Image (cartoon, rainbow, N blue to C red):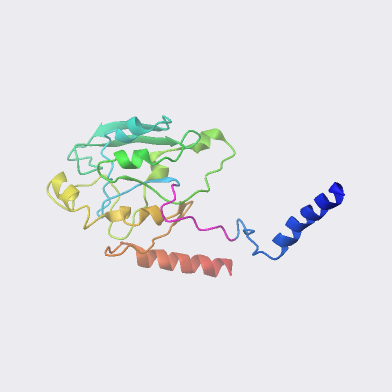
Amino acid sequence: MGAITGTFKGFGVTFSHMFRKVVTTDYPFKPPTPAPRYHGRHILNRYPDGLEKCIGCELCAWACPADAIYVEGGDNTDEQRFSPGERYASVYQINYARCIFCGLCIEACPTRSLTMSNEYELARDNRQDLIFTKEQLLAPLLQGMEQPPHPMRLGDSEKDYYVDSLTNPGTSAGAERSPMGPGRYQVDEHPGVTFPGAEQAAQRAAAEKGETA
C-alpha cells in the first residue's frame, strides 16, 4: 500500500509541473537578460575626450580579496598623456579565474574608472585567456573621443575632469547595463545623461540584424 501511495505522490509532482509555465531558456540564441546591477565583466571607462579614467592608484588591487587584479602605474608627461592626473595604469590585468565578482574593486575606485557590466559569457578553453589585459578591458572609443596619448581637452588640470565627472561622465554612464563582448558595445538609456555614441550603436545593431536576417 505504501508503494502505491508513493507512486501516486511521484506522479503528482510530475503532473503538477505539466501545467506550469515553461522556464527553459533558448540559450545561446536568446540569452536571458541579467538584472541591471548584475556583476559581470569589468570596464575601464574613459572621459568624453578619450582619456582614461584610471590613474594607476592600485586601490582596486588592494581591495580585491581574491588577489585577481594586477596594476602597474606609469607617469604621464606633456608628450605622452593617457589620463588627466599625474599617473595612469601602464599595465592593468584582471584574472577571471580568480575573480569572485564581489564588486569591492568598484567601491575602492576613486575616479569611477572601473565599473562592471552585465556581460557574463567569460568561459574560455585556456586558463591563460581568462587573464584580461588593459586593452581588453578598456571601453571603446565613442563619438568625439580620441585615442590617447593626447593633451587634456576638457580643462587645464585634472581637477576640471574630476569636478565635472558627474555632469559629463563619458563611458561610465550606464556602464553597469552595457554588455561588452567581442566587437560590440551596447549603449542603454541613462536618465539625465546624454551618452555619446548612442546613434552609432543603434546603426551598428541594425546592421547586425540585417546580416543575420
Q: Characterize the magenta stretch by its predominant secondary structure.
A: loop
Q: Residue at x 35, y 57 (%)?
A: 174
Query: Vertically, is 1 above or below 66?
Result: below
Q: Quadrant of residue 170?
A: bottom left
Q: Residue furthest left?
A: 156
Give me the residue at 40% from left, 63% from top.
Answer: 201
| 33 vs 127: above or below | below
Q: Position of residue 96 (x, y in %)?
A: 48, 37
Q: State the image coordinates of residue 185 (x, y, percent, origin top left).
A: 42, 56
Report the label total.
0
Position of 24 with respect to 31 (left or right) is right
Residue 6 pos. (x, y %) = 81, 50
Location of the C terminus (image quadrant): bottom right
Where is residue 51 shown, x and y percent of the image? 26, 48
Does residue 152 show up?
no
First to last magenta residue range: 30-39
| Relative side of 123 to 175, left or right | right
* Image height of 99 relative to 23, above or below: above
Q: Residue at x 12, y 48 (%)?
A: 156
Question: Within the magenta stretch, is there residue 200?
Answer: no
Any part of residue 171 in sight: yes
Left or right of residue 101: residue 15: right
Query: Would you say residue 34 sits in the magenta stretch?
Result: yes
